[in-house]
Image (tube, coloured by chain):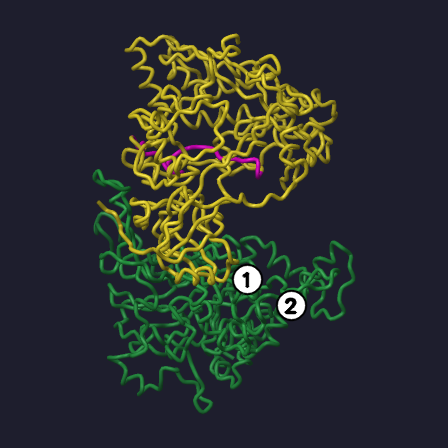
Amino acid sequence: MKIKAQISMVMNLDKCIGCHTCSITCKNVWTNRQGAEYMYFNNVETKPGIGYPKHWEDQAKWKGGWELKDGQLQLRSGSKPERLLKLFYHPDQPELDDYYEPWTYDYETLISSKRKNHQPIARPRSLITQKRMDIKWGPNWEDDLADGESARQDYNLKQMASDITLEFHDLFMKYLPRVCNHCLNPACVAACPSGAIYKRDEDGVVLVSQDGCRGWRHCVPACPYKKVYFNWKTNKAEKCIFCFPRLENGLPTVCADTCVGRLRYMGVLLYDMDQVKDAASTPDKGQIYGSVLDILQDPNDPAVIRAARKAGIPENWIKAAQDSPVYRMVKEWKVALPLHAEYRTLPMVWYVPPLSPITRRVEADVFLPEVEDMRIPLAYLAELFSAGNVPVITKTLQRLLDMRLVMRAQETGDPLPRRLEYDVDTYKAMYRLMGIAKYKDRFNIPAGTQEKSREKLNQLQGSCGYTCPGGC
Amino acid sequence: MNSLKDKSLQFSVEDPDNPQNFPRNLFIWRNNLIGSSAKGHEYFLKYLLGTKNGLFAEEDCPNRPEEIKWREAAELDKPDGAASGKLDLLIDLDFRMASSALYADVVLPTATWYEKDDLSSTDMHPFVHPFQAAVDPLWEARTDWEIFKTLAKKVSEVAKEANLKPYHDVVAMPVQHDSEGEVAQPEGKVRDWSKGECEPVPGKTMPGLIPTELDFTKIYEKWIALGPGVSQKMGSLSMTWDSQEEYQEIAQRNGTIQNKDYISYGMPSIFDAKQAADAVMGLSTTTNGKVAVKAWQSLEKETGVGNLTRLAKDRENERFTFEQVAVQPQATITSPTFTGSNQNRRYTPFTTNIEELVPFRTITGRQSFFLDHEMIREAGETMATYKPILDYLPIKNKIGGTKEITLKYLTPHNKWSTHSMYFDSQQLLTLFRGGQTVWFNEKDAAEIGVKDNDWVELYNHNGVVASRAVVSPRLPRGVVYMHHAQDNHINVPGSKISGTRAGTHNTPTRIHMKPTHMIGGYGQLSYGFNYYGPTGNQRDMYVVARKMQEVDWLED
């Protein structure tokens, strides 16, 4: 057993209102600069929809993630020799139009307009070419099912054997906020010819070394979530860094901190590194989720604690793992699921799937619907969150419904159904964490492994100042 | 009174097209009137501003008003006629170059929320929030407080140079809500003194008439001080209480005006914004426990309901200051000015009416669903009533020449803007289509050959909107959505139909006056500023939608 610590995130989609505050605060902090204008380390999509970049879920097109070849795990983009052949020309690259052409406006014409016959106007201008442009696509073009035609192109809809037409009468939608998943088995790391992408030892954050990156761009198609971007100005890859400078100070990411719906949770997971490959190689894609749960270790198990100490994990990290909101939701209660587990990258951002309004009239005295009655088809959620495994998504939603039943019964005194999976106190704890948790309950992040970084800082002490103006 | 009776003196509203009655100067502050909240955008452009507009409306009024003077088109079209540009001067305070600023004669650049000290509150929640200057205003910008203070000073200076004498006027004031005026017109019967149905009695059968004196030379001296109006007694709604102690306390806290020549000499200073905020919180029932207790005592006396004072008694010693709310927004003290109770619970209206039996401020003192005013009865609205959309043609003659469809026009609120605020932000516009949009049902769009992101025009007799189409299954058939207050100075082309810049979400609209909103002097149906009165109802419209034939940006 080789224990590793991972900072992980849960998003409770029941609470997402699609406001995009996360996207905007992230953009303001990380990608509001030349070469990165089109990048959204954090974006929010309306589902169904083709997303950002367009059709990112279609791995036949991008060849992202991993596949099993004769039972062996291999990058979908090919074996090592095959990828070497594509070193100088990689055909599966997304282009700018797959994301969108970023723009600004001629605001200045509003201020310094000459006397004119008609009201002055600020027209759009490309941030890439600086030329006039027609806006044809954007990072959230499909907001709230804006374009019915593109919503119907949703990859998951096509995988479902049903005749959902997305007409007014059978409409459904949900929001899907996305960041880098900081996977346990990251395809971008494996695909990088320069070894410039790495998964940080202490917290599992996946980073691109800006010194090491040679701009081969193999990471871009390799990431099945399309969360590695290519900066056209620096010719280097960039991606969500999980706001690691904040993590190191015990603060959650900007997207999580600023979330209006308070739907994001962050904490530590302990996992057994020795079993990662086996979990990713689970033959049946519908069982990968279960395999991942198996390699997540119980932080209160003395054997795990011993192994963690042996692996050099500091006490404050073990303590944080024992009090991790993410562990609770993912492993104890099993209410959070990975996005597209079939990509076999073992994502470490998890989603509590959303409940939705009932589609048909149910008995007048039924206050809470059964999961099958909900507007968002189970098969659709299964495509997203359980690799097509409908029983898994059904059970997960049932746990969320049971929580509501139990909490409702606290007020009404109604009898509880017999089939409850957990005891009443567990549902109450779920309600506390998912319903009314405060900042400190939603985020439990140990402030870095500062033993080494402090040393470095100490060396820097006194080196800044009068002697080296302009930076050290 | 006799002059009013024999009509030798008239209200200006009786002759709105007379140049003497035009509004001449307009300040726009904390608002984006032109292009956002002006209901009937093109009418504002034409009649108020006298500039290029896309108005089609022909004068078409088969039922001419009898009590308003009617002037014929020839007279209106004279150079100083009512048909074009009533306003002489438009001044806009803003920190955005939004549409109001584009059309203003003078733009006064003002501080943003992070460059000024201010208070914010509402009766929707029980907190007082501060604004605090994190940085000073940039470039030429000043805070609102400083701008108006500067103007006050300059006007006073000029008035002194011009040796202006105090100006006396009479202001007509509607019969007020929460005053004795509420029983001015018993049984909800309207009698018209101008037709001899009753005697004109100010504040009873007609508006109150308030004589005023304006001394332009002293505006500044008064502006910087908390005046004598609140030095003895204060009130809110129908309650009154002694305010001497608070007035003195504010004088202590803020200091007083030192200039012996000023009329405000010795009065509490509100020279800067923080002082003004502290004065407000020293006088308010929600931020000064002593005032709250006095107000509750007044309400007890007024209503005969006992034991109300305890609702504020436990916080009698609290007096909010700007420094305190700057540390943290604070929950306000339970006040009879509002009907919520802040006693360790969530704030919700009408709590004290239900739990403490404080009478509702209605004609019956209870929740009133049935309204018996004669105008309400005439309109058939004594109980809550569904009324369908007004059935009229969007325009007499459609333009034609291409496929067109008539749809109901709805203007819900936008996702990434607060009215027009933030709508022109590059980052927020990037979150959707980069400019104005109109949402169509897919089948409606198909009928006129419109695909997603096509340019479309919507028109009716009030004007033309040009916008990108959003073609979605989320809308039912028969309606279009144009989100409210999308600014048309971003990415909006010209319209071939109107021949000028296409309009805003308020272009296809105009105000409908609803007669029942003009009821006054009858219990809860009495006028209160920003509280109860005629609303500018501009919705319930039809538009004709069509694909745009040619996109012309009209940058000349």
Mark 2 belongs to which amino acid? Asp
Residue in front for this viewpoint, A18 or A267: A18
- If the image is split into quadrants, where does the C terminus of chain B sit? top left
Q: Residue at x 30, y 15 (%)?
A: B157
Same chain? Circles 2 and 1: yes
Per the image, label 2 sits on a secondary structure element best described as helix
Asked if B372 appears above or below B168 in the picture, the reply is: below
Residue corresponding to mark 2: A373
Q: Residue at x 35, y 86 (%)?
A: A79
Asked if labels 1 and 2 touch by Cβ distance under 8 angstroms, the answer is: no
Magenta segment range?
B106-125
Mark 1 belongs to which amino acid? Asn
Q: The chain drawn green is chain what?
A: A
- Crowding at label 2, few (<14), some or many (≥20) Cα neighbours within 10 Å? some
Percent x, y of residue B61: 45, 33
Q: In which chain is the residue bearing label 2?
A: A
- Crowding at label 1, few (<14), some or many (≥20) Cα neighbours within 10 Å? many
Q: Residue at x 55, y 34 (%)?
A: B514
Q: Is residue A314 magenta?
A: no
Residue in front for this viewpoint, A89 or B531: B531
Percent x, y of residue A208: 33, 69
Q: Nearer the viewer, mark 2 or mark 1?
A: 2
Percent x, y of residue B19: 36, 21
The residue at the far front in this view is B62
Asked if B297 appears above or below A39 in the picture, the reply is: above
Mark before the other along the chain sequence, 2 or 1? 1
Q: Residue at x 26, y 81 (%)?
A: A87
In the displayed structure image, the side of residue B539 where residue A470 appears, left or right: left
Residue A12 image label: 1
Asked if B122 appears above or below A241 in the picture, the reply is: above
